Amino acid sequence: MSIRFKAIIVSVFLICVCAVPAFSQSGGSYGAYSPYSVFGLGELSRQGTAYNKSMGGTGIASNNKRFLNIMNPAAVTARDSSSFMADFGLEQKNTIFRQNDLRSGNNVFNMYDFVISFPIYRSSAMMLGITPFSDVGYDIKLKQTDPDIIGNTGNITYNTFGEGSVYQLFIGGGVNFWKRLSIGAEAIYYFGNLDKVYNQDFSNSSYASLNSGYSLLVRGFTGKFGLQYQQPLGNDLFMVFGATYRLGTGLKGRTIYYENKNTSEIVDTLVYSESLNRDTDMKIAGELGVGISVKKGDKWSAELNYIRSDWSDSGMDRYDGYNVNGVSSFSTSVSQSFRAGFEIVPNRNDIRYYLRRCSYRVGAYYEQAYYKLDGNTVNSMGITLGVTLPVFRWYNGLTLGVDFGQRGSLKTNMVRERYVSFVVGFNIFDIWFQKPRYN
């Protein structure tokens, strides 16, 4: 790889690290859009690159040297020697919301990851990158319909909206032992800003409108550990066992609450309070993941994952700005997910038919959110499809994926979301530190 190309890669990474938070915090842009994101830290992002997302979100037991797998830090050792790898992904999501007879729709476009990886020494390697951890995005408007109230005050409009994201910046490494066992560790830094706003506007100018809300500054630091063990079964067939554990961490940062009274001429500050989160018991929950996969060389692979995270003691339901006092009773709970994925390559070395060299994937998932509403769990389920198109040489490729899913239901006055999400991943691969054979 040329020095110029290396400089370009490093420059792009720095630009993305700086640009992602700025993009998400700009007015009117959302990392995700869902009425469920009003609770806690918002909607937790499904982790992984386009490769993982098109496999149903699996990756804990994935041991594929052709793709960057950020689900398990131990997987970074699956690579060719002296190989440099990078992954950059984009996502576009279209959602239809329904609650009783009410219907609406929304779509968002977002960058969801940028990761680079490189070898360190012999069987060890590193990776570093940035990806969203959670997103807040909603905009709900209601009008007062009680004729007695309207007769006295005029029309009243209630509007609540929120935006912001929490990102995770991570750096990790792994080492391989005896060609079968890989162990990895990762340091994760959480950072972001979440804004949740409530407005009450009167059409009659003799009444003052009310503007209130929370501005949440989120900070945190934690670690993640992973391992993979590969067992040969004969005839180029392997079974891989994987496990990960992310430590829980206290939630640092700051909470600002404000109330403003607005008239046509002046804005009065009624309440402004600022508190640090240093002495609270709020935390981001730990997470345990296990997986098993079977693969036959570069021909095909199948994987199953289970992930569990206990948020019941996270404190999100006890602190203002994170809990929601309204129509629904919000309580934190245990989140868990079951995921499955399958990949097949008809003929990776076919020189006649391009489509036979492509990697085709299908997956499915079932997830339970980290909270309950009025004692009801909020579940998601879906199927994924994907393909990686080889580009140029080595393992460079363009990964395309689609996710058809549903969250929530129409029971107990809940909101049902049906969505189609498209992902595009750019897989970059090259060999570093090659010695020229001829001068």
Image: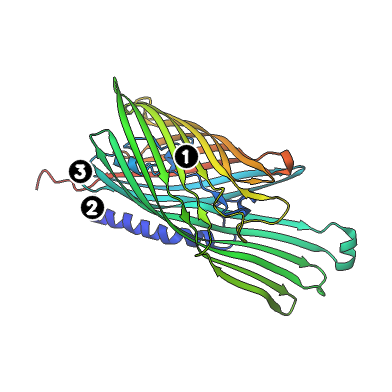
Badge 2 or badge 3: first in the primary sequence:
2
| 304, 399: nearer the viewer | 304
Q: Residues within 10 Å of mark 1 (few under 14, many from 20)?
A: many
Amino acid carrying label 1: it is: Lys
Left-right relation of 290 to 92? left
Q: Nearer the viewer, mark 2 or mark 3?
A: 3
Q: Which residue is mark 2?
A: 2
Instruction: Answer with mark 1 or mark 3, whichever residue precedes in sequence.
Output: 1
What is the CA distance from the residue labelled 1 to the residue labelled 2?
Answer: 32 Å
Distance from the alpha carbon under mark 1 to that under mark 3: 30 Å
Distance Cα–Cα, label 2 vs label 3: 22 Å
In this rendering, position of residue 434 left or right of residue 229: left
Q: Label 2 neighbourhood size at 10 Å, few (<14), some (14-19), many (20+)? A: few
Quarter location, residue 325:
bottom right
Query: As rendered, which of 64 and 85 lies closer to the eye?
Result: 64
Amino acid, disc 2: Ser
Q: Is residue 391 above or below residue 323?
A: above
Relative image position of residue 281 (x, y in whole percent): 53, 58
Give the label on residue 242, or none: none
The quarter of the displayed image where residue 272 is located: bottom right
The percent position of residue 4, horizontal first and vertical second, equals 26, 56
Q: Nearer the viewer, residue 250 or 213?
A: 250
Q: Which residue is mark 1?
A: 53
Residue type indicated by callout 3: Arg
Badge 3 element? loop
Q: Circle 3 sits on which residue?
A: 122
Residue 63: percent from left, percent from top: 34, 35
Q: Are marks 1 and 3 in contact (CB under 8 Å)?
A: no
Q: Is residue 351 visible?
A: no
